[in-house]
Amino acid sequence: RRSWAEPYRIKMVEPLHMTTREEREQALAEAGFNTFLLRSRDVYIDLLTDSGTNAMSDRQWAGIMLGDEAYAGSENFYRLEETVRECYGWKYLVPTHQGRGAENLLSQSLITPGSHVPGNMYFTTTRFHQEHAGATFHDVIIDEAHDSHSLHPFKGNVDIDKLAALIDEVGADRIPYVCVAATVNMAGGQPISMANLRAVRELTSRHGIPIYLDATRAMENALFIQEREEGYAGEPITDILREFCSYSDGATMSGKKDPLVNIGGWLSTNDRDLYEEARNLVVVYEGLHTYGGMAGRDMEAMAIGIREALDDDYMKSRVGQVRYLGMLLEQWGIPFVKPVGGHAIFLDARDFYPHLDQDQYPAQTLAAELYLESGIRSMERGIVSAGRDAVTGENHRPKLELTRLTIPRRVYTQAHMDVVAESVKACFDHRDSVRGLKMVYEPRYLRFFQARFEPL
Ligand code: F0G
């Protein structure tokens, strides 16, 4: 049998809207050639993100009816708190409206101006909150992560030598925590190994530095450990996740990914003082500490989703679907980040359009071309997303110039993946005629969301 076939069936459907090429040309021009600015009704297959775009199960929808919408002390909060404690293992929970709310709380609570925060690559909102709170961010991921051709099985690993050198250079007392993402979104959804996190723990505990995970896709990371790391082959992902988290002090979470819901997030920690501080701050930015910006029903749906996502068969089908798309693209020699990561295929726009300079926004261009071709929406993860240096104002120029085809959980079928692959192939076939874009409007913060472009 197919090892990744879905362990569920479809009970409710949502019609999709097809468009003509002329309609798409107009929609794209109105959106300033930025897929974030398209209206959803003009999109056929939406691979912009796997964030909040997941399908909930019948159990989760039933849970929605159990929403306790009390301002204070909602039953659903306690259910979520208990679920996080059991499945991830940290003691305290502060709910937030989504991941970046938790990042804000963590950054504001632990970072003081002049701090340094190392991380295995970066995520846009995470790094923003760290810098906004006054820290300098340092990328300590292994070099292989920046190479789309490297087949390293754990490209999300921290480079222990880089981290040790940074500790020596700036001093442990100026590093409030190490931020470890699992899996690493910007590297292509690449996992980090158990052994590597253990090594980070060994090093940092000698210096008294805590580790905070970005646990947004840590369950997907657990599947990679099960598949690739010695000693974990027969272990259920539940146990792998628990062990993984045990090497950290807490985490921020975007509930919109692994936990199979449309909105929500949290900060979790074993540190009583951080908990007290974050629980106090959350009332300023999000809401009372027993809802943090979520409705009671959202917290219930997340508690159920966390347990559903920890099913090995589900997780195999989730990551298996991404790999299926990768397999189709591979047979046509289309360039993308390998090995295939957990949540998306990242097309390598540098290799796709070798005739374009990075200042002509190859990844943004490819996202626009793919939309024009077939109404499929993808996302730039290259020079636009990388933004500018907070101090010098210069453009970051990331080695990876990628267009992400992000697969929502439990939403699209294998036939949809076939359409996606064929559309990418069509773009690949006429790649030589593509000329690139210029940016005509640049927002100050996280510019990729609202920047506007024109064709060259
Ligand atoms: N951390 C990671 C690794 C993420 O991928 C995201 C969101 C966040 C934090 C922020 O969480 O959106 O709930 O505030 N990633 C989405 C994406 C937006 O498309 O990759 P949020």
Image: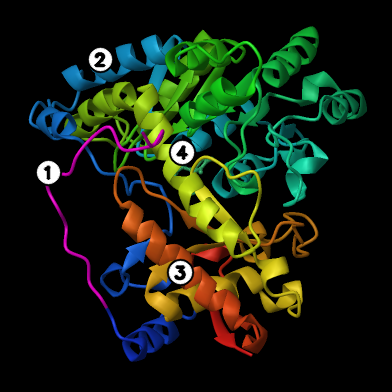
Q: Kindly identify which numbered label has been placed on residue 78.
A: 2
Q: Earlier in the sequence, mark 3 or mark 2?
A: 2
Q: Which residue is mark 3?
A: 422
Q: Earlier in the sequence, mark 3 or mark 4?
A: 4
Can you say which quadrant of the picture contains the C terminus?
A: bottom right
Left or right: residue 147 versus residue 233 is right
**Rendered view: 426 above or below 36:** below
Say whether residue 63 is magenta. no
Q: State the SS at label 1.
A: loop
Q: Main secondary structure of the magenta part?
A: loop
Q: Earlier in the sequence, mark 1 or mark 4?
A: 1
Q: Decide if residue 74 is in sight here.
A: no
Which percent across, then down, holds residue 263? Answer: 31, 41
Q: Are marks 1 and 4 in contact (CB under 8 Å)?
A: no
Q: Residue at x 10, y 30 (%)?
A: 62
Q: Earlier in the sequence, mark 4 or mark 2?
A: 2
Say whether residue 13 is magenta. yes
Category of crowding for the residue at label 2, using alpha-carbon neighbours closer than 10 angstroms: few (below 14), some (14–19), many (at least 20)? some
Work out how far the residue at label 1 is from the one at label 3, CA to CA, in angstroms.
28 Å
- Magenta range is 1-18
Which percent across, then down, holds residue 132? Answer: 62, 45
Left or right: residue 448 versus residue 31 is right
Q: Residue at x 27, y 35 (%)?
A: 294
Q: Kindly identify which numbered label has been placed on residue 319.
A: 4
Number of the front mark, 1 or 3:
3
Q: Which residue is mark 1?
A: 11
- The amino acid marked with disc number 3 is Glu
Left or right: residue 265 versus residue 181 is left
Q: Kindly identify which numbered label has been placed on residue 217.
A: none
Q: Is label 3 within 8 A of ligand 1 (CB to nearest ligand atom)?
A: no
